[in-house]
Amino acid sequence: MGVETDTEQPKSLVDRIVENASLGRMALRLAWQADPRFLVALVCLLAVQAALTPLQLALSRDVVDAAAREVGATHLAGSGPPLVWSVLLLATTFAAAALIEPFSRTFQSLVGDRLVGHVTGALVRATNRWPGLARFEDPSTADDLERSSGYAARSGLELVVYGARTLLLGCTAIGLCWALAGLHPLVPLLLLAANLPSLTRQFDFQNRTGSRIYVQTPQARTLQYSRNALIRPEAAKDVRLFELGGFFRRRYDDAFESSVGELDRMRWRLTRPMCGYAALAAAGAGAVFVLTAWEVARGRRGVGDLVLYGGAAAALSSTLSAIGFQVGFLPMVFAFLPSLSRVLTAPPDLPVATNPRPAPRPIRDGIVFENVSFAYPGRDEPVLDGLSLRLRPGESCALVGPNGSGKTTLVKLILRMYDPTGGRILLDGHDLRDYDLDDLRRELGVLFQDFLRYEFSAADNIGFGRVEQVHDRALLLAAAERAGAKDLLDRLPDGLDTQLGARFGGRELSGGEWQKLALARSFARDSQLLVLDEPTAALDPRTEYDIFERFAELTRGRMTVLVSHRFSTVRMADRIVVLRGGRVLEDGGHDELMAAGGEYARLYTTQAAQYLDADTDAGPDDDPDPDGRRESTR
């Protein structure tokens, strides 16, 4: 069972049995942990349902025989239960079946809901054990997460349901064969032979379609991405402005046709031969009817035997077909379980120190990059190549360079979202990998350009910087003041308690207002190292000016790493590092680098010229800068 990809080495039958047994135990354990009471109740109900079919056939025979005796139509001597009792018993079984079915479906839903919640919680806990970013940016892990959250989350329930139903259907089939043996010992064997091709085809149908769904996981993610572009508010402006609706609809339709079209063609190919095998199974059941009718006509059997044996033959045929159908689902269940297992059992993606050191308080020697190289997983070309750099305590350092020069990668390494692939990073003389990671990150505050907008209260948006003190209003207001967000809080109808974001009916903010709260979140952390990655990209010029007029105050006492393309911002740093090709090209203060006439001077002059051109084009009555300031002269 299971699906083997083209890149996997073929496994022996013993290896596959051992692997599937382990996966099955994992799925059953998850189902049991989700809610054992409902699971036991579901299995009991399925067992009762399986036992009712042979019982109903036997009671149906008694009803027919009793009715025949009442009218004197039976050719056999002897007596049986009175007609009224036979009818009551048969009616009771039908009533029981009708009563049990909704309970069975309800318990299946109850178990399913709890299992999905339990597995989702396990997935969340598992992914939270990944302290870095490598797995989240790995396509194969993305496929595993898609399979785990979409299909494998219910695998434990499906394994229980399909496995239990298969087992119980097998018991039903044995009971029916035992009953049919009363007509002739060869009858059940002949019926099994007639139904075997149909059973195997049912299994093949489910197995192959399930395998196709498994390998189409990347296409499913493409479908989801295209769909989200059309229905998520984040993309709504671009989609409408650039008339991208048709493009994404076509992309969705193409991916849908590619995936579903392949499934449809496979299903039709598999369905055609199934018709002939189904006819063979039906012919076998018909032959039993004919044989029983012949026996009744010759006086060797009672009329009720026609119901018993004919019904048993038809029931055996449908039961065997159902077994093939149910068993066919099991390979698909086992196909998705390895993805779930890989996610749940994946170790941390960054090595954990055996005896981790606490983060230094205060930082005394700073951070040192010693010949650091780094390449992202799956890429051969390094982003950083032998970079050496020192960041001193209390110093603000700006990183400058063209896109792809390694600025954001360097920041990710400082935050230990990745580890270097070569060289090492030292904090106060010790490798970052020697420190307790959680303790280390408590000393790091960061504002990324692609910061998150939490659609909770304004207090939450600031307090998440130090979540254990999210209810400390004084801390939140102080952080908002430092980030220039105090006036925003004053304008909000409920201040810190205002619900933000239109998704939940709250107050929507501008990009700059969201960024003010994100900046306040960084200050609420009160960390020793502050990382600002394009911190004012969404702010209007006046707000940016107000914040950076207080730049020295905002960064006082803490090591600061600033990434920005605005040189009016960069020049406020104590030190400027120019990166190119993953290495340090220039390093010094603004005046020093301008006097050197190198890359920094060229970039700065180019940006300044753009502002001068804007001033010239604006004319004497126009002001290209709302604050009347000129970045070229700062």
Image (cartoon, grey):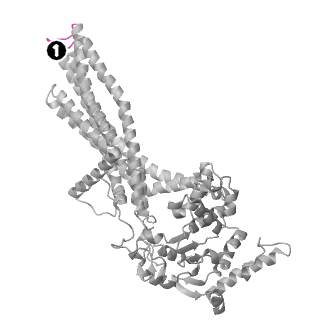
Residue located at (80% from left, 72% from top): 623
With respect to residue 420, does 163 lie above or below? above
With respect to residue 450, does 426 lie above or below? below
Where is residue 85 drawn, in percent x and y? 25, 14
Q: Is 516 positioned to the left or the right of 415 in the image?
A: right
With respect to residue 157, does 319 lie above or below? above
Where is residue 355 drawn, in percent x and y? 34, 73
Instruction: Answer whether residue 401 is magenta in the image.
Output: no
Give 579 or 311, whichever is nearer the viewer: 579
Where is residue 281 drawn, in percent x and y? 27, 34
Residue located at (17% from left, 34% from top): 189
Q: Quadrant of residue 9?
A: bottom left
Which region is colored magenta? Answer: 72-81
Residue 201 visible in the snapshot = no
Residue carrying label 1 = 299
Give 536 or 615, whichever is nearer the viewer: 536
Q: Which quarter shows the C terminus?
A: bottom right
Residue 233 visible in the snapshot = yes
User: What secondary structure is found at the residue carrying circle 1?
Assistant: loop
Give 333 or 386, whichever is nearer the viewer: 386
- Name which residue type carries label 1: Gly
Instruction: Answer whether residue 76 is magenta in the image.
Output: yes
Q: Examine the residues drawn in magenta and state their main secondary structure.
A: loop
Q: Is 380 positioned to the left or the right of 238 in the image?
A: left
Q: How many marks?
A: 1
With respect to residue 203, does 349 lie above or below? below
Residue located at (37% from left, 51% from top): 152
Residue farthest to the top? Answer: 71
Residue farthest to the bottom? Answer: 596
Where is residue 521 drawn, in percent x and y? 57, 65
Q: Quadrant of residue 70?
A: top left
Q: Residues within 10 Å of mark 1 (few under 14, many from 20)?
A: few
